């Protein structure tokens, strides 16, 4: 077998294996999130039926499994263990309606600013984190603290827009599956363009570096994908049909 055919065959074979096992470097890489979410929902379905103290113990065990397990598990099951505590905390918050009792705009804005500052410093201390790779950062015990701070921060931020009706928000929300599928390529090209046009980004513009830069690029990515969402919803509307 010629070398170039053998080389291409090995590449295609590996790509197929990565696709079947749900690896993030496969052609359907972003789908690892859906696989992980499936197992999170599956685990949580059984956990919520248990005694609350057993639930807490299981969530702690889940975090320990995600951190200490020495192997990468297929279909993002290991990432599901890492995400499960965050998902369940969100579930408890939704069930309790605790945050709905905070309806003072001034208090919400102040809390948002405080949480934003706290999250910025946590990110600075933690460094890079990655749920797909089960990277908890420099200080693993801060990972869930940072996740909770970010969760509350975005809740208080989003609540400021409850009384408004923005079509762009509805479109982006309904087309989040498109963002999930295309954000990697969009993010990559956006970062590349920024690096080519702003060469002194990290040296002379420290505020546009690290976490804040990633947030800005993420927002820009959603804006860029706004029109692809509209086009896909127009020509492939059957994917968005709601059940009666």
Image (spheres, rainbow, N blue to C red):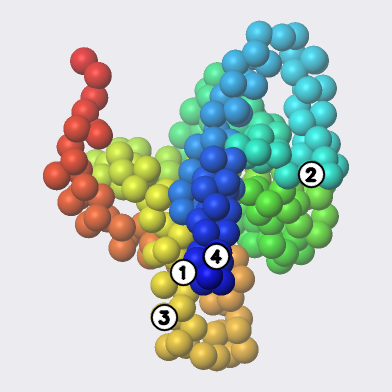
**Residue 171 screen position, x and y as percent:** 26, 45
Q: Residue at x 71, y 9 (%)?
A: 50
* Gap in angstroms between the C-alphas marked 4 and 3: 41 Å
Q: Is residue 98 left or right of residue 178?
A: right
For mark 2, what is the residue?
71
Residue 1's mark? 4
* Gap in angstroms between the C-alphas marked 3 and 2: 36 Å
* Gap in angstroms between the C-alphas marked 4 and 2: 34 Å
Asked if residue 6 is positioned above or below residue 141 in the image, the reply reads: below
* Marks 1 and 4 in Cβ contact (< 8 Å): no
* Gap in angstroms between the C-alphas marked 2 and 1: 28 Å
In the rendered image, which quarter contains the C terminus? top left
For mark 3, what is the residue?
193
Q: Residue at x 82, y 55 (%)?
A: 139
For marks 4 and 2, the one nearer the N-term is 4
For mark 1, what is the residue?
188
């Amino acid at each position: 077998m010629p070398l170039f055919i053998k080389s291409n065959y090995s590449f295609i074979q590996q790509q197929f294996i990565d696709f079947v096992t749900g690896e993030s470097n496969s052609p359907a890489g972003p789908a690892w999130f859906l696989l992980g979410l499936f197992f999170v929902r599956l685990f949580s379905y059984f956990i919520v039926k248990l005694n609350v103290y057993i639930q807490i113990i299981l969530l702690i065990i889940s975090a320990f499994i995600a951190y200490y397990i020495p192997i990468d598990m297929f279909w993002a099951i290991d990432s599901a263990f890492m995400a499960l505590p965050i998902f369940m905390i969100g579930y408890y918050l939704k069930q309790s309606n605790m945050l709905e009792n905070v309806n003072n705009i001034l208090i919400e804005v102040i809390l948002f600013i405080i949480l934003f500052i706290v999250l910025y410093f946590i990110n600075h201390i933690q460094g890079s984190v990655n749920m797909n790779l089960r990277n908890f950062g420099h200080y693993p015990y801060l990972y869930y603290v940072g996740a909770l701070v970010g969760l509350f921060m975005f809740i208080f931020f989003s609540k400021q827009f409850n009384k408004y009706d923005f079509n762009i928000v509805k479109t982006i929300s309904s087309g989040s599956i498109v963002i999930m599928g295309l954000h990697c390529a969009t993010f990559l090209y956006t970062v590349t363009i920024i690096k080519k046009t702003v060469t002194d980004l990290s040296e002379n513009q420290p505020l546009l570096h690290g976490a804040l830069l990633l947030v800005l690029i993420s927002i820009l990515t959603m804006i860029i994908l706004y029109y692809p969402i509209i086009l896909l919803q127009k020509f492939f509307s059957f994917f968005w049909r709601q059940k009666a």
